[in-house]
Image (spheres, rainbow, N blue to C red):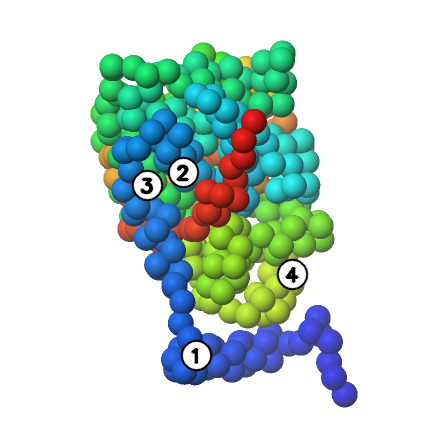
Amino acid sequence: MNRSATNMTRREFLALAAQVGVATALAPTLAACAPSGPTYDDHVKRVWEQPLDAGGNMNSQILEIIRYATLAPSGHNTQPWKFAIKDNTIRILPDFARHLAIVDPDDRELFISLGCALENLVIAAQQMGYADETALFPANDPDAIVVRLNESKTKSDSHLFDAIPIRQSTRNEYAKQKIPTDDLQKLEQASQAPCISALLFTENQPIESFIEYVKEGNRQQYADKHFVEELIQWLRFNDDEALQRRDGLSTRCSGNPSTPRWLGSFFVGGSNGDDQTEKDAKNIRSSAGMMLFVSERNDKAAWVETGRAYERYALTATTLNIKSAFLNQPIEVPTLRSQLQTRFNLAGAYPQLLLRFGYSQVMPRSLRRPIEAVIGRG
């Protein structure tokens, strides 16, 4: 009699996983007989190692500027952006078809992602010799971030631009090494904006508090079957999936093995969050500290400005060889977000992003969709 997957014992599951591992190991040998195309690593090089092409006319330069914008981080690597070009103006628009209905129902993280892309775009434009006039959701175009580019003789400092194709969200264990005070101050300074504050924590007591909030966030999220289904939808369990979609959370980027979708879905779908909590706690304790981004308002413009501030932080950290990774569970669960406000005396401020930072080795990089998939005219 066939046993349902939900009744499979852990020992049976591990035995099955081992058999799949053997099949996976044999796959390259079998694939050698078939026509080969660009590999995951080939596409990574095309995305992250392609140098800036500053030649050509303004139209081709704008395409290059947008390409750098798409190297920004986004929730679940959904890349929820569209870019419309008309003359010297770029409109950045939300792609609601790629939003996360469960983990981000009000599209807060989506607009933070647009802010990250905007900051990359502005930095790349300045590197190409353009000054920007940026308007967030103007009255005559309330759905768009509007960036008008004008030629400028003033060229910006290139250190942040050079960091754009190097920056990554690094989700592995860190080196348990302290960061010099001068570098911490640079991170704080880079993160400031008129309505945004970045609170830095390096002491054990607040960090242990964050671990408890992350633990409870995992418990509540993994108890929601719709959250788990959405997570599985955006996981790319093997290179074939990642290459086909060019988005989502590739398991290789977090150091996990390649598996068939049915097996990866079975494992994630049967989790209660304990494994994730154990991993998160270990990773947090290996980090040099944590940072909490808060805003004075809680609207689209504030979310975009949060993204811009975070991206300046991330690029500055990259120049200092400092890695970081998000731990937004306590902010994504509304009751926990309120508790964070009380615990850290954030009256009148709204938690937007929580992350850990420290020194670590470079991890595999994620992919991006081709430029023609995100661009239009008008």
Q: In this view, does 180 lie to the left or right of 271?
A: left
Q: Which residue is found at the position 51% from the left and 69% from the top?
A: 259
> Which mark is in front, 4 or 2?
2
> Which mark is in front, 1 or 3?
1
Q: Where is residue 376 in the image (x, y as percent from the top left)?
A: 54, 35
The kind of residue on which mark 3 rests is Pro
> Which mark is in front, 2 or 3?
2
Residue linked to disc 2: 67
Q: Please, which residue is most extreme toward the bottom here?
A: 1
Residues at discs 1 and 3 in contact (Cβ within 8 Å): no
For marks 4 and 1, the one nearer the N-term is 1
> Which mark is in front, 4 or 1?
1
Residues at discs 3 and 4 in contact (Cβ within 8 Å): no
Residue linked to disc 3: 165
Height in image: 41 above or below 191? Answer: below
Q: Which residue is found at the position 42% from the left and 51% from the top?
A: 366
Q: How far apart are marks 2 and 1 (CA)?
A: 33 Å
The kind of residue on which mark 2 rests is Arg
Residue linked to disc 4: 269
Res. 183 in view: no
The kind of residue on which mark 4 rests is Gly
Badge 3 element: loop
Q: How far apart are marks 2 and 3 (CA)?
A: 11 Å
The kind of residue on which mark 1 rests is Ala
Residue linked to disc 1: 34
